[in-house]
Image: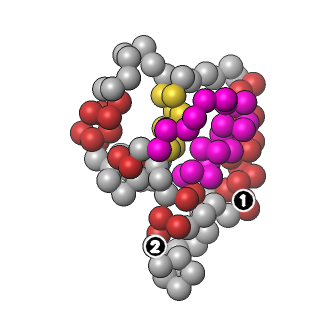
Amino acid sequence: KAEDRSASRYPDDGLRPLNDQGRREQVIISRALRHMGIRFNVLATSPLVRARETADILALGMKWKEPIVEASILGHDFTIDGVLKWLGQYPSDSCIACVGHEPDLSE
């Protein structure tokens, strides 16, 4: 969950952060993923503030030690073809955690 859209507070939507509820939910989700044994070898995020915050919380909860990859294709530049091309740079057996935005990722 992100802060409400507000042109006066966040004239650039990319600067809109997570709200307190969103941060709390992500802490719970991150810990649950770790306890379920979920593992990945790449953690990638959109450059938008709220996605980066989500990725940072995920990294902390999962005890992730590697750099987080910032990928513009997961942000305002999102296209399915673009994401598929971007994913193609990794070995086919990679497990990649992508932090992006709705509705892009679910469509």
Point 42% across, 14% down: residue:
93
Q: Amino acid at mark 1?
A: Gln
Mark 2 crowdedness (10 Å alpha carbons): few <14, some 14-19, many ≥20: few
Q: Position of residue 41 (x, y in %)?
A: 54, 23
Task: Kindly indicate the quadrant of the structure image that contains residue 106.
Answer: top left
Mark 1 crowdedness (10 Å alpha carbons): few <14, some 14-19, many ≥20: few
Residue that sits furthest to the front in the current view:
67
Observer-nearest of 15 and 106: 15
Q: Which is closer to the viewer, label 2 or label 1?
A: 2
- For the N terminus, give its image quadrant: bottom right
Range of magenta residues: 51-70
Q: Position of residue 71 (x, y in %)?
A: 41, 44
Marks 2/1: CA distance? Answer: 22 Å
- Reply above or below: 30 against 21: above
Q: Position of residue 56 (x, y in %)?
A: 65, 45
Instruction: Determine which residue is flagged by label 2.
Output: 12
**Residue 36 shows in the view:** yes
Q: Which mark is first along the chain, 1 or 2? A: 2
For numbered disc 1, what is the local secondary structure? helix
Instruction: Determine which residue is flagged by label 1.
Output: 21
Point 49% across, 38% down: residue:
69
Residue that sits furthest to the left in the current view:
81
Give the number of the disc on residue 67: none
Tell me, yes or no, whether the highlighted magenta stretch contains residue 21.
Answer: no
- Reply above or below: 60 against 7: above
Point 53% across, 85% down: residue:
8
